[in-house]
């Protein structure tokens, strides 16, 4: 699910990071914590000195606006694509990367929890254009059942970071690395299936551009070698087709057997 | 072909370490938010723009969206944006930049615009696109600021130059890029040496005089795309050029250039109403005019043209340049003649045309912009208007950025008149004003279009009034009558004029006119030659229009 309301998203982000936030639907006043000040405000020396002197730092107030203000306003404009939001994104991606959670259950008899490894993986197809897919895959570490769109099932469950009373985790039969490898192998097989027209196009384009470049510089003098190299690098950066796997986040989720996870076991499909 | 596959190998190592050490483990909330951030930043399709739906407060025009899409999808972000003036090249560029930023493909960008437009660009990017660009102040931090707007003149100077050249830019934009048409200039070399992935060149007049202009522009984007310089100029500048080559060239250029014309857009344009105002010199002025014609004609007709043109503008303009000339004059007799002439100019009464212009401004009784070619005239007109109780502000290229903004604001809010020299003709948007006075005319029709484009642009709600001054029986008369009127330059939007001028292989339009005026021995001869020139242009224009009607549009 993509962010639909930037304002709410920011509210959630700062709240989840224990900041005090006041908001009026268009402005956000955020009293930062030490940690967030250090992360976002770009003043490493301040924090270095504060620590050296053994003092308590004073984290700043961040005043944001999700709509355009008049130029005299001291509020900072934040919107999709702005560096500040990128900074928050990358902070979140650091923070929310690894996880181990237990299903929240109110039970009074012994309940086993099954371990699932869940990986959210961004697959980028990069040629002269770029396309990305976000896949959320979970694997049952007991029986090897593999499920796509796992995140949707996870969002319906309440989570705790420690295990609830009467619950106990079952040890995985398929070990962590093995589970991980099964998911990666599955995805690697998957991307081999379609025709990669985009890559062929892009490769051709790269060759064409390189030929043109060579032609342009063929009569030029040696001191233009650097320029040639710069241009050639730019062409490769633009057109060399590549596919990248980036694991956005992931970890172990312990889920009771009786929880309904609507599944088709995709691990069987390609075998 | 090979597709490189890159895997993320560190994740599983880190995960297993963090799990066993119970370290760095996230809460469900942060885990979920993190997933959502990625989900909202990914580019789901190879095609289509993400930007417009995130910018609902801006009403983008169809041709602007189409342009941005074409540049992103087909041109891979290296393009010349060459819409006619007033169609919103800035908007198109902003859309493209935003798109790349959203896709995470651009982090570091350099935006090079004329000094007078730095603030305007900054405002537009912030307000329309939420792009927080930094305008370069005294000590810009080139390596730390992500999106920087500055002028090319600042950028190419030390100490900025080396700093900038060592940066890896994802995106470079050059506004008013026709200034890069000459590959020998420092500006050109500088832009060419920038390390850049995506690159946009903005200009309303991609070809000002000759086809090599476009060659040079394209060579910044895609060196080699039009071959090397020698073979290009051989092929396209010689007489043996043929129609087939031209078609081929046109197709090539379409791959790197988007050019929308006014008639291609769905915008309803207000009309242009043109009025020519003839003025007679007073006897004394006419007398001096003839003296210059005679006294200087036999020596160098070209330099006499300069003085004649200046005299048609103001005593001051002519006086200053003649005075300068006298200082350098070595021949005793010639010097004496010139000094006599100088004294006569000094004695002249208020300029006939200037007086007329003041009357016009009074009768308009609304905001108007006056264009002149000469600074001396600019100062003079300002003084003369003042004498009649009319406030005005000057505008010229040499002003600092802040002053330009200030002048524009004064004009918008407080004073009736802005007097601009040629350098003021570019980039500023004055759609709140609908009267334009061509106090004297430029000899290059493209420059005229630039002038009109200041007020006749998207956002103009009134019909635009254009007043042209010409003094009877002078070179001004010739240029206006024979050239501009014949090709109906004022009424019709310029159309393919730039291409036509290039087709005619008039290496420099101004020079062409100068040489007609200078080399002709009589008024009759001038008339014939100018008529011929105008006829050819008119013919090419109508041919071009037919071609366009047949669906051979230059932009797709």
Image: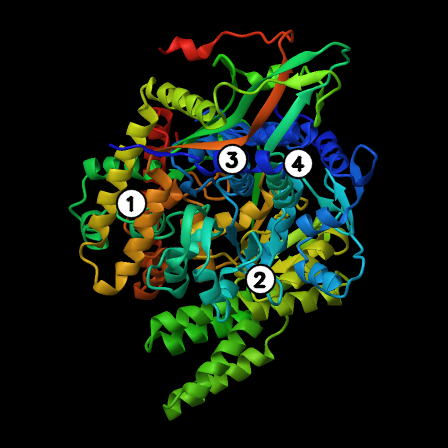
Q: Quadrant of the N terminus of chain A?
A: top right
Q: Which residue is mark 1?
A: B503
Query: Are discs 2 and 1 both within one chain?
Result: yes
Disc 1 to disc 3, C-alpha distance: 41 Å
Q: Which residue is mark 3?
A: B103
Residue B23's spot in the image, x, y percent? Answer: 63, 39
Chain ID at mark 4? B
Say what secondary structure mark 2 lies in: loop
Residue drawn at 77 percent across, 35 percent down: A15
Disc number lying in front (3 or 4): 3
Based on the displayed image, in which of its 4 quarters is residue B2 positioned?
top left
Residue A135 is left or right of residue B408, and the answer is: left
Disc number lying in front (2 or 4): 2
Q: Is residue B29 above or below residue A30?
A: above
Q: Are marks 2 and 3 in contact (CB under 8 Å)?
A: no
Residue B347's spot in the image, x, y percent? Answer: 59, 80
Say what secondary structure mark 3 lies in: loop
Q: Which residue is mark 2?
A: B141
């Amino acid at each position: 699910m993509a962010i639909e309301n930037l304002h709410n998203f920011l509210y959630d982000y700062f709240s989840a990071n224990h900041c005090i936030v006041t908001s009026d639907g268009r402005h956000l006043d955020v009293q930062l914590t030490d940690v967030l000040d250090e992360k976002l405000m770009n003043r490493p020396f301040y924090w270095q000195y504060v620590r050296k002197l053994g003092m308590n730092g004073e984290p700043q107030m961040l005043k944001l606006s999700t709509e355009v203000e008049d130029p005299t306003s001291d509020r900072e404009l934040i919107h999709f694509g702005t560096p500040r939001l990128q900074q928050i994104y990358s902070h979140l991606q650091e923070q929310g990367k690894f996880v181990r959670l237990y299903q929240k259950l109110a039970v009074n008899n012994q309940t086993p929890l099954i371990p699932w490894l869940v990986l959210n993986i961004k697959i980028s197809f990069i040629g002269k254009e770029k396309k990305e897919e976000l896949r959320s895959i979970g694997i049952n570490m007991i029986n090897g059942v593999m499920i796509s769109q796992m995140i949707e099932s996870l969002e319906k469950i309440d989570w705790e970071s420690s295990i609830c009373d009467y619950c106990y985790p079952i040890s995985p039969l398929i070990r962590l690395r093995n589970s991980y490898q099964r998911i990666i192998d599955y995805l690697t097989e998957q991307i081999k299936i379609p025709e990669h027209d985009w890559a062929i196009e892009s490769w051709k384009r790269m060759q064409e551009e390189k030929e043109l470049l060579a032609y342009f510089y063929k009569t030029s003098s040696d001191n233009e070698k650097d320029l040639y190299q710069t241009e050639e690098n730019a062409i490769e950066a633009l057109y060399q087709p590549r596919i990248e796997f980036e694991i956005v986040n992931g970890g172990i989720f312990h889920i009771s057997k009786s929880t309904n996870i609507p599944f088709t076991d995709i691990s069987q499909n390609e075998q | 072909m090979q597709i490189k596959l890159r895997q993320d190998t560190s994740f599983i190592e880190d995960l297993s370490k963090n799990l066993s050490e119970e370290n760095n483990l996230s809460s469900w909330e942060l885990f979920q938010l993190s997933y959502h951030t990625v989900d909202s930043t990914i580019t789901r399709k190879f095609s289509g723009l993400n930007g417009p739906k995130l910018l609902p407060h801006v009403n983008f025009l169809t041709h602007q969206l189409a342009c941005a899409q074409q540049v992103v999808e087909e041109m891979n972000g290296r393009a010349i944006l060459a819409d006619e003036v007033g169609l919103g090249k800035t908007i198109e560029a902003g859309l493209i930049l935003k798109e790349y930023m959203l896709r995470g493909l651009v982090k570091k960008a350099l935006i090079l615009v004329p000094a007078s437009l730095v603030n305007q660009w900054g405002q537009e990017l912030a307000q329309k696109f939420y792009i927080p660009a930094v305008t370069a102040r005294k000590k810009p931090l080139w390596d730390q600021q992500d999106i920087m707007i500055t002028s090319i003149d600042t950028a190419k100077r030390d100490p900025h130059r080396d700093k900038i050249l060592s940066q890896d830019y994802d995106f470079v934009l050059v506004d008013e890029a026709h200034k890069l048409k000459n590959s020998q200039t420092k500006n050109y070399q500088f832009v060419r040496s920038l390390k850049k992935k995506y690159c946009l060149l903005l200009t309303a007049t991609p070809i000002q005089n000759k086809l090599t202009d476009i060659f040079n522009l394209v060579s910044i984007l895609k060196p080699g795309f039009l071959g090397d310089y020698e073979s290009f100029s051989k092929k396209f500048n010689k007489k043996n050029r043929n129609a087939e080559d031209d078609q081929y060239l046109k197709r090539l250029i379409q791959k790197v250039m988007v050019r929308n014309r006014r008639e291609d857009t769905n915008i309803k344009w207000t009309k242009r109403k043109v009025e020519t105002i003839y003025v007679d010199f007073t006897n004394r002025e006419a007398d001096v005019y003839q003296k210059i014609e005679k006294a200087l004609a036999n020596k160098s007709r070209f330099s006499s043209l300069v003085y004649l043109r200046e005299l048609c503008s103001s005593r001051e303009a002519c006086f200053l340049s003649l005075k300068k000339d006298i200082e350098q004059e070595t021949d005793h007799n010639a010097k004496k003649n010139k000094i006599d002439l100088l004294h006569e100019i000094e004695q002249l009464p208020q300029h006939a045309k200037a007086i007329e212009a003041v009357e016009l401004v009074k009768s308009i009784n609304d905001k108007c912009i006056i264009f002149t070619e000469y600074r001396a005239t600019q100062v003079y007109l300002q003084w003369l208007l003042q004498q009649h109780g009319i406030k005005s502000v000057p505008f010229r290229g040499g002003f600092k950025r802040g002053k330009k903004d200030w002048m524009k604001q004064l004009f918008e809010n407080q004073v009736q008149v802005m007097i601009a020299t040629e350098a003021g003709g570019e980039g500023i948007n004055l759609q709140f004003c609908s009267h334009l006075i061509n106090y004297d005319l430029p000899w290059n029709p493209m420059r005229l279009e630039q002038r009109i484009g200041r007020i006749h642009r998207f956002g103009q709600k009134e019909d635009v009034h254009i007043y042209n001054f010409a003094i009877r029986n002078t070179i001004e008369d010739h240029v206006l009558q024979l050239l501009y009127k014949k090709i109906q330059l004022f009424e019709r939007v310029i159309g393919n004029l730039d291409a036509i001028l290039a087709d005619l292989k008039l290496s420099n339009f101004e020079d062409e006119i100068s040489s007609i005026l200078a080399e002709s021995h009589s008024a009759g001869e001038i008339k014939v030659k100018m008529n011929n020139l105008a006829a050819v242009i008119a013919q090419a224009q109508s041919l071009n229009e037919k071609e366009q009607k047949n669906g051979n549009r230059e932009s797709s």
